[in-house]
Amino acid sequence: MFTQRRQLLQLALGSAASTLPLLGQAQTAESAKILAGFAAGGTIDTLARRVATKMGGGYARSVVVDNRPGAGGQIAISALKAAAPDGNTLLVTPMSMLGIYPHTYRKLPYDPVADLTPVSLGVEFDMGFAVGPMVPASVKTVPEFLAWCEANKQQANFGSPAPGSVPHFVGVLIGRAGKVALQHVGFRGSQPAIMDMLGGQIAAVSAPVGEFLPHLAGGKLRVLATSGAKRNRFVPGVPTLVEQGYKDLVYGEWFGFYLPGKATPEVVQRANAAVRAALAANDVIDGLAAMGLEARGSSSAELAALLKADTERWGPIVKSIGFTAES
């Protein structure tokens, strides 16, 4: 499913150049901003800053990133909801806040469909499942890790960037597939979880693949599996969960760009052309790849379809796990 999406969106990215004339059809604003619901330095912030740099001077004379961390990304989304739909305020957000949160929160301060207008997909990425020094070096696969957990129940745990996130649910589903109860430990970000794993406080971490890349050279962690339909190009030596016998465990996530809900088609088209042009730049593609992120542009309609599909897919999964934001 994730591979089919990529094939579809590659076609969309190729047509970005044809829409570039739209950039000059509207009067250039003095300034514009991209809201990001997480602190500076992370993957969302990196994506926002690279795109903002490319949009500056064309889309608006200056384009800045406005970090609004808090409430798991909800503060930034609420800020977009309240912004004027003139194209001068955009948002970049993970899918989770729009496709999973409606299944985990009884009430949200925004409607993911009515209050946001899709502009373009930004990046896609797979999850990785890694172990640290707590787990013996002889453990090299997910089945071996689960067997070790069964024999060491007090240490059968894993961390994730946040409760209710895609990495959290992937870790739960791995344990369920192997009929092993894994204790989840929620963190505020992937790197704090990885640091605790490297320090021997937790056994494993489920997180975006790119989060593990800076630590691979040290040899203190081992990525046992990735969650895509095919091997991840950033860690080609690591087998997928499917290869290890978990045929239904194919999951990924994406970050997308949005405008306020009442943005006109003309405003959306202009923003779409600017974002896609930025994502097609070689230095942006290479910079994002260094963080394990695949740059992917799309049309507004394609992003809307992706969100609808993921919202429908994750509903039954969240229900089966039984997680709520209040739990």
Image (tube, rainbow, N blue to C red):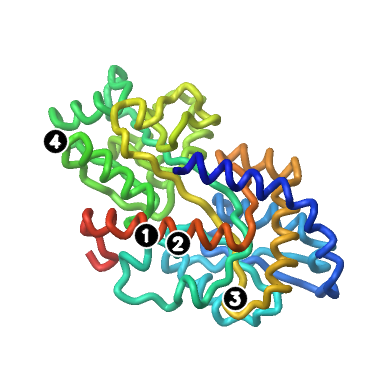
Q: Can see residue 221?
A: no
Element under label 1? helix
| Residue type at tag 1 | Glu
Residue shown at the point (52%, 46%) measured from the top left: 5
State the image coordinates of residue 76 (x, y, percent, origin top left): 53, 70
Mark 3, residue position:
260
Quick check: 86 above or below 50?
below
Q: Earlier in the sequence, mark 4 or mark 2?
A: 4
Element under label 4? helix
Disc 1 to disc 4, how far (Cα)? Answer: 34 Å
State the image coordinates of residue 25 (x, y, percent, origin top left): 85, 70
Say which of 319 and 61 sits in front: 319
Disc 2 to disc 3, how far (Cα)? Answer: 18 Å
| Residue type at tag 2 | Lys
| Residue type at tag 3 | Pro
Residue shown at the point (38%, 75%) measured from the top left: 108
Mark 1, residue position:
312
Quick check: 218 above or below 51?
above
Element under label 3? strand
Task: Give residue 308's mark.
Answer: 2
State the image coordinates of residue 176 (x, y, percent, origin top left): 20, 41
- Of discs 4 and 2, which sits in the foreground? 2
Mark 4, residue position:
153
| Residue type at tag 4 | Lys
Q: Residues within 10 Å of mark 2 (few under 14, many from 20)?
A: some
